Amino acid sequence: MILSRGYRLVGGQALLRLEAFDTMVDNPIEVLHTVMLDVGKALVKNLVRDDLNDQELDILQKLVRSYDSKGFKRKLSSSLRLRGSFVGRDYKIVLQQLPILLENMVIRRLVRMTPGFEAIKNCLGSLGRLISLIYISGITSHSHVYVQAIRCEYMQFKNCVLLHDGELRKMSTPKKKRATLHNTSKMHILCHLTEDIIRFGSPVFFYETEKGKQFNRFIREALFRTNRRGI
């Protein structure tokens, strides 16, 4: 009927053949916006703002720039003070380095061991392990073990976040309230990660957000009966 009215679809015909489509269930989690640019970004912001003084931040910055590992060659070129301009690849680097570097600072007694610092260090350590599991591109056998490992690490991360949020509440005042992380939408979405892995495969492929945007374009065209991009 749409084609008979003169409208042209360039790939959305398959969408029209679906019996049903639920955007919450039938779209995989976007790893970029859920992990890197939301949960991870919030933890880095809290670490720099609340748990490190200027001297400790300078020490951490030097450790980040001098980081050298055979298993992880990529380095962060930007300053942690400019975290507001970080993109996804910057958070992918820093979130895997911070757990090691913060532990190094603790061993060398270069940082104050406050309850808030210990809580966020545990959060970043758990998130770093979760990210390492997420970026495995393929599992050839015992996939159920992989899914269970991600499920267990997410629960560990969630418990760490709850403790961290408890420390944030202690720092909150009537004039300056600290936003907690455990009750955000992205933390809730993340709990469905294992379901999406079972259904769609490796979460690495969820990183290709442009494909999701292309699919959303097909939905838009079918709904509005037009190919205009401005809608």
Image (tube, rainbow, N blue to C red):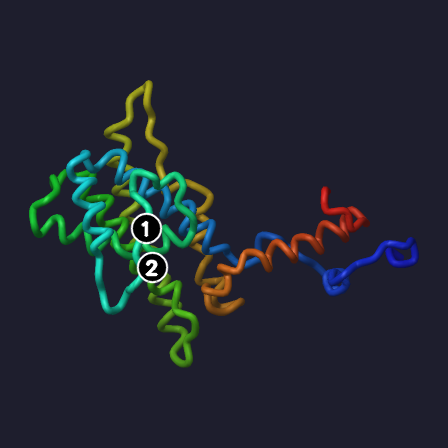
Q: In the image, what residue occupies the spot 11% across and 39% down?
A: 112
The type of residue carrying mark 2 is Leu
**Where is residue 108 drawn, in percent x and y?**
7, 50
Between circles 2 and 1, the one closer to the viewer is 1
Question: Helix or strand or loop: what does disc 2 sit on?
Answer: helix
Q: Quadrant of residue 193?
A: bottom left
Q: Residue furthest right?
A: 4
Q: Check the image and name the residue furthest to the bottom.
A: 141
Q: Using the image as rendered, state which of residue 188 and residue 87 is in the foreground.
A: 87
What is the residue that sits farthest to the top in this orientation?
175
Cα–Cα span, label 2 and label 1: 23 Å
| 167 in relation to 223, above or below | above
In the rendered structure, find residue 130 and report the number of the disc placed on it.
Answer: 2
Q: Are marks 2 and 1 in contact (CB under 8 Å)?
A: no
Left or right of 12: which side holds 2? right
Q: Point out which mark residue 217 bears.
A: none
Element carrying mark 1: loop
The residue indicated by pointer 1 is: 77
- Indicate the position of residue 230 as horizontal and vertical percent values: 72, 42
**Drawn side of residue 185 relative to residue 213, left or right:** left
The residue lying toward the viewer, choosing from 76 and 31, is 76
| Residue drawn where x is 35% and y is 59% of the image | 131
Q: Amino acid at mark 1?
A: Ser
Residue 105 rendering spot, x and y as whole percentages: 13, 49
Dividing the picture into quarters, in which one does residue 93 lie?
bottom left
In the rendered image, the quadrant that contains the C terminus is top right
**Mark 2 or 1 closer to N-term?**
1
Quadrant location of the N terminus? bottom right
